[in-house]
Image (tube, rainbow, N blue to C red):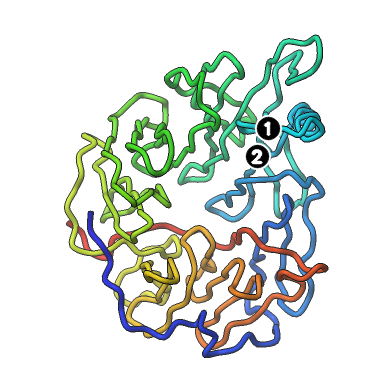
């Protein structure tokens, strides 16, 4: 596992610079905020975010590569009813709630449910047999034409990888997954140009097991790596290397392991993957490249490559604009605020934060992003 060396940089999270008043954005591209189970949008940072959904149970939102759709999962009514019963009885649910997949169209502003629960679905209802579907968060195909997710039939444990074609409005089972009778959460799905990875690991600290399927559901290879003592996986993602992609695992220590999707073997590399906007970073490109490291006392931080600009923040709580020259951050410490860094100033988004009347931001979605290795191996 290759580790990222910590640079001597100026951490913005120490608030050497202050949060500045909001001003208008330079682009009409909306910044999407996820808060309290719903989606919000802001284009003009001088205004409060506008609520897009009124669901309250949204999780795992994912922006399509063309920024036209947001795919997410939402708890089904039978799941919410079961949760209310469990809470009333003083118990805690030990598995994910039954859920459905929804697509939200940003241009037209409508939500399109794409899955349902089975006929006669029921969970923890007196006199009825349990029958429900647990689903993972959806993942977009690289071309934005489809989404994929995993699902488990509860309580029998049969599991599948499912693909939904947006234009045809049709879902189909891509592949059968190993039975999951004791699994509490549907395995996470990650879709890249080199395949679809399904995370069958017991948890982030255990041995890592990731079968990789092609876009039509054929098993390509099985990636496996022994657990790393005292170092859990924080992110599973595809990393572009030249004209191909490899599967990358980022650990809490800041170390990476990269795997070949064809034969499942670990591959050597001499540079650390960077997060960029989804456009080639050739000579003359202007988009930022974000490197991530770990400070022993503060945790993950990002830094803009070839600059002295850095701040605390985890990879799953930042988003670059489409042109890669601005950065949105969720839950800025210690204010709980979402904000945008424009290269000079850090601008707080009004109405977000940890106050009683503020929106606590759990995730930000902006432009399409991709992980790359700055040099090929």
From the viewer's perspective, tell me whether residue 298 is left or right of residue 105: left
Q: How many marks?
A: 2
Above or below, 214 relative to 54: above
What's the residue at 64%, 49% (across, down)? 69
**Residue 366 picture quarter:** bottom right
**Residue 146 picture quarter:** top right
Residue beneath disc 1: 100
Above or below, 232 relative to 31: above
Q: Residues within 10 Å of mark 1 (few under 14, many from 20)?
A: many
- Position of the C terminus, as image quadrant, is bottom left
Q: Residues within 10 Å of mark 2 (few under 14, many from 20)?
A: many
Secondary structure under tag 2 reads strand
Q: For this rendering, which residue is in front, 94 or 345?
A: 94
Separation of marks 1 and 2 at Cα, in angstroms = 5 Å
- The answer to the question of whether label 1 and label 2 lie on touching residues, with beta carbons closer than 8 A, is yes
First in sequence: mark 1 or mark 2? Answer: 2
Q: Residue 367 in the image: x percent, y percent? A: 54, 62
**Residue 175 picture quarter:** top left
Q: Residue 370 in the image: x percent, y percent? A: 42, 57
Q: Which mark is residue 115?
A: none
From the viewer's perspective, tell me whether residue 113 is left or right of residue 159: right
Q: Residue 4 in the image: x percent, y percent? A: 28, 66
What's the residue at 42%, 19% (across, down)? 178
Residue beneath disc 2: 73
Secondary structure under tag 1 reads strand
What's the residue at 63%, 52% (across, down)? 68
Q: Residue 281 in the image: x percent, y percent? A: 34, 68
What's the residue at 56%, 35% (across, down)? 136
């Amino acid at each position: 596992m290759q580790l990222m060396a910590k640079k001597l940089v100026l951490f913005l999270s120490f608030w050497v610079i202050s949060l500045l008043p909001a001003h208008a954005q330079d682009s009409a591209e909306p910044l999407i905020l996820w808060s309290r189970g719903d989606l919000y949008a802001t284009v003009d940072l001088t205004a409060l975010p506008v609520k897009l959904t009124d669901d309250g149970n949204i999780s795992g939102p994912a922006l399509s590569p063309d920024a036209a759709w947001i795919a997410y999962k939402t708890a089904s009514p039978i799941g919410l009813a079961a949760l209310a019963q469990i809470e009333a009885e003083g118990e805690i649910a030990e598995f994910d709630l039954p859920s459905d997949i929804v697509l939200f169209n940003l241009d037209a502003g409508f939500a399109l449910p794409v899955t349902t629960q089975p006929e006669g679905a029921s969970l923890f209802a007196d006199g009825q047999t349990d029958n429900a579907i647990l689903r993972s968060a959806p993942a977009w195909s690289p071309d934005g034409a489809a989404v994929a997710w995993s699902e488990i039939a509860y309580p029998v444990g049969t599991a599948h990888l499912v693909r939904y074609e947006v234009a045809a409005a049709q879902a189909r089972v891509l592949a059968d997954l190993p039975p999951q009778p004791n699994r509490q959460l549907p395995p996470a799905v990650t879709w890249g140009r080199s395949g679809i990875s399904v995370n069958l690991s017991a948890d982030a600290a255990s041995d890592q097991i990731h079968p990789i399927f092609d876009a039509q559901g054929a098993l390509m290879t099985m990636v496996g790596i022994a657990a790393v003592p005292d170092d859990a996986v924080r992110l599973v993602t595809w990393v572009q290397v030249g004209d191909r992609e490899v599967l990358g695992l980022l650990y809490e220590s800041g170390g990476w392991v990269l795997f070949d999707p064809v034969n499942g073997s670990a591959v050597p590399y001499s540079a650390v993957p960077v997060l960029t906007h989804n456009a080639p970073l050739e000579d003359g490109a202007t988009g930022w490249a974000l490197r991530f490291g770990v400070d022993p006392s503060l945790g993950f931080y990002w830094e803009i490559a070839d600059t002295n600009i850095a701040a605390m923040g985890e990879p799953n709580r930042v988003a670059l604009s489409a042109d890669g020259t601005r950065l949105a951050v969720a839950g800025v410490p210690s204010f709980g605020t979402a904000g945008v860094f424009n290269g000079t100033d850090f601008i707080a988004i009004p109405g977000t934060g940890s106050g009683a009347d503020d929106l606590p931001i759990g995730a930000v979605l902006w432009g399409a992003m991709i992980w790359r290795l700055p040099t090929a191996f």
